[in-house]
Image (cartoon, rainbow, N blue to C red):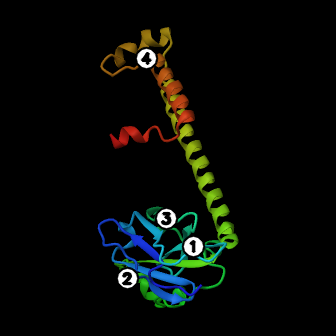
Amino acid sequence: MAATSNVIGLILPGQPVQVNGQIMSDNEIMFQLPVPHSQLQHLVLFLTGAQALPENHGASVYLMLSDNGFKFLGHLANDKPSAIFRVSSSASTKSSASNSPPAQPAMLSAAPTETAIVAVTPEPQFTRIGVLVEPLSAIQQKIVPKEQQVQQQQTDYLTFVKALAQNCYDHMSGWILTEEQWRTRGQALVQEKLVPIGALEQWFDSFRRKLTQNPNFWKKSIDS
């Protein structure tokens, strides 16, 4: 496919729609966004319809990192003409061979090469997004590891939250006083705020149940 600049469109919140990316080669397009990585949360890429992708091909989307590597974000295809990509968690992730295009794209060689300078200067005030048209079979090889990584992160996160709640419950349970201990030490605790252990047990049971049903239920209290 001979790339044309208006095949892919990009939407960045608060910025005009971009449909004229820089052509780097026959199958590569690059967008330069006037926003540093740290301020970039999400962006939308879409097929404009000016030219269909070749059969059995898709458009891989990459984020250029400060070390001149690339991070795979996702892809577009003729049957998936648009997508929202989350960039915030990817910008600080170091690149690896598994996340880079199989062959070094021209957009990588065209990027600034003063790596040592980048390492000691402030964050660049722009972000580069690369689009590489390649076979869907090659894209699929990138998607599977990415999905496995997300699933592992979700599992680790869920394990941490459960351990945190268990630790809180165990710590508070350690303050339970027997009737004899209350007679000897209870008077000193009268001025403290006391919580019945039954209330803590109800919270712990409710927390575990909600976490099982919806691991993200706790975010509602933060967003409200």
Which of pointers 2 and 4 lies earlier in the amino acid sequence?
2
The answer to whether residue 209 of the structure is visible from this angle is yes
Q: Name which residue lies at 70% across and 70% down.
A: 137
Could you tell me which secondary element the residue under label 3 belongs to? Answer: strand
Q: Nearer the viewer, mark 1 or mark 2?
A: 1
The answer to whether residue 174 of the structure is visible from this angle is no
Q: Nearer the viewer, mark 3 or mark 1?
A: 3
Asked if the residues shown at circle 2 and circle 4 are in contact, with their CB atoms under 8 angstroms apart, the answer is: no
Q: Which residue is label 2 attached to?
A: 121
What type is the residue that disc 2 sits on? Thr
What type is the residue that disc 4 sits on? Pro
Q: Nearer the viewer, mark 2 or mark 4?
A: 2
Q: Which residue is label 1 attached to?
A: 60
Residue 21 horizontal/vertical position (percent)? 43, 82
Q: How busy is the neighbourhood of tag 4: few (under 14 within 10 Å), some, or many (20 plus)?
A: few
Could you tell me which secondary element the residue under label 1 belongs to? Answer: strand
Q: Which residue is label 4 attached to?
A: 196
Asked if the residues shown at circle 3 and circle 1 are in contact, with their CB atoms under 8 angstroms apart, the answer is: no
Q: Is residue 16 above or below residue 196?
A: below
Q: Name which residue lies at 46% across and 69% down.
A: 45
Alpha-carbon distance for marks 1 and 4? 56 Å
